[in-house]
Amino acid sequence: MAGLLITIAILLPGCNLIIAGGCEIKPEAQCSGADLHGANLTDADLNDASLGNADLSGANLHKANLKRAYLDGADLSGADLSGADLSGADLRGADLRDADLFLADLRLADLRGADLTGASLGGALIDGARYNSDTKWSVFIDPVAKGAVLVED
């Protein structure tokens, strides 16, 4: 019996991100406002990508490269960002509630106004990450003890 291989590709309007069986993701993707909730983006290379206000809720971004990505206002609630590199990422106002950030690299990220309520930050690196009084942290996280820097707007 011969197997049947079906590949589904979705080209998002105004976005150079192609989602197919193997998920071809390109650095510097221009995907602001894209609906990628629940997408499997494991190991994706999205460094310097523009994903502001994108819906990435419940997405699998395990070990994704999101260095310097623009995620301002993005919905990452419930997303798997374990082992992801978010160093230098702009996460201002991002929704990271209940996200898995275990072993994620958030060094030098901008977390001002981000909501990390219920997020798992075990082993996450946040040295030099900027946050403000509007940033909401998980109950057991002391941002200062982990090296984050409080800034005033």
Image: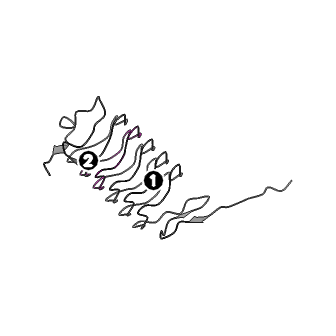
Where residue 81 appears, as percent x and y from the top left, is 42, 45
Residue 133 location, quadrant = top left
According to the image, label 1 marks what residue?
A: 55
| Disc 2: CA contacts within 10 A as few (<14), some (14-19) or many (>=20) | many
Q: Which residue lies furthest to the left in this view?
A: 152
Determine the CA span between mark 1 and mark 2. 17 Å
Q: Does residue 96 show up magenta in the picture?
A: yes
Q: In this view, does 3 lie above or below 29?
A: above
Q: Residue at x 43, y 64 (%)?
A: 31
Where residue 103 appears, as percent x and y from the top left, is 36, 40
Q: What segment is highlighted magenta in the picture?
A: 87-109
Q: Is residue 146 left or right of residue 120?
A: left
Say which amino acid is labelled 1. Asp
Q: Which residue lies furthest to the right in this view?
A: 1
Q: Is residue 106 left or right of residue 57?
A: left
Where residue 77 appears, as percent x and y from the top left, is 42, 43
Q: Residue at x 36, y 44 (%)?
A: 104
Q: Which of marks 1 and 2 is nearer the N terminus?
A: 1
Where residue 69 appears, as percent x and y from the top left, is 34, 59
Q: In this view, does 128 lie to the left or right of 7?
A: left
Q: Does residue 152 show up magenta in the picture?
A: no
| Scheme by which the image is coloured | one colour
